[in-house]
Image (cartoon, helix red, strand yellow):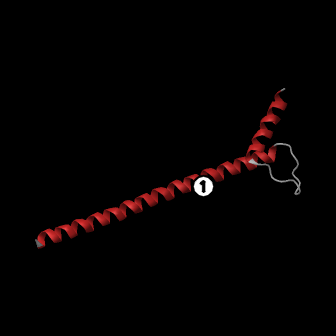
Amino acid sequence: MIAKQISGELNATLRSGSVKRNRQGKTHVRLSINARERRRMHDLNDALDELRSVIPYAHSPSVRKLSKIATLLLAKNYILMQVS
């Protein structure tokens, strides 16, 4: 009887340790995924900023920065205008 109780407590302890390790592993994976996504978005925003700097539009302080979609559409139209 005591051996079963000790065995049950030992199994419970081992399981809880494994659950904590599993949870820490999932947390680490999630943090890695979040960091990769954050880096990807920074790279995308940097590329769009570079694109905005080379396409012709008003760059004065009173003009708002173009949105991502507006930047892409303006760049597409500028390229098409250059080709024709």
Q: Amino acid at mark 1?
A: Arg
Q: Is residue 31 above or below residue 4?
A: above
Q: Is residue 60 above or below residue 24?
A: above
| SS type, badge 1 | helix
Q: Position of residue 47 (x, y in %)?
A: 70, 47
In the image, 9 versus 21, the foreground residue is: 9
Q: As drawn, which residue projects farthest toward the top? A: 84
Please give left or right for residue 72 compared with residue 22 in the image: right
In the image, 51 versus 14, the foreground residue is: 14
Q: Is residue 32 above or below residue 50?
A: below
Q: As drawn, which residue projects farthest toward the bottom? A: 2
Q: Badge 1 is on which residue?
A: 38
Q: Residue at x 22, y 65 (%)?
A: 11
Count of numbered circles in the view? 1
Q: Residue at x 77, y 35 (%)?
A: 76
Q: Position of residue 67 (x, y in %)?
A: 76, 48
Q: Residue at x 83, y 54 (%)?
A: 64
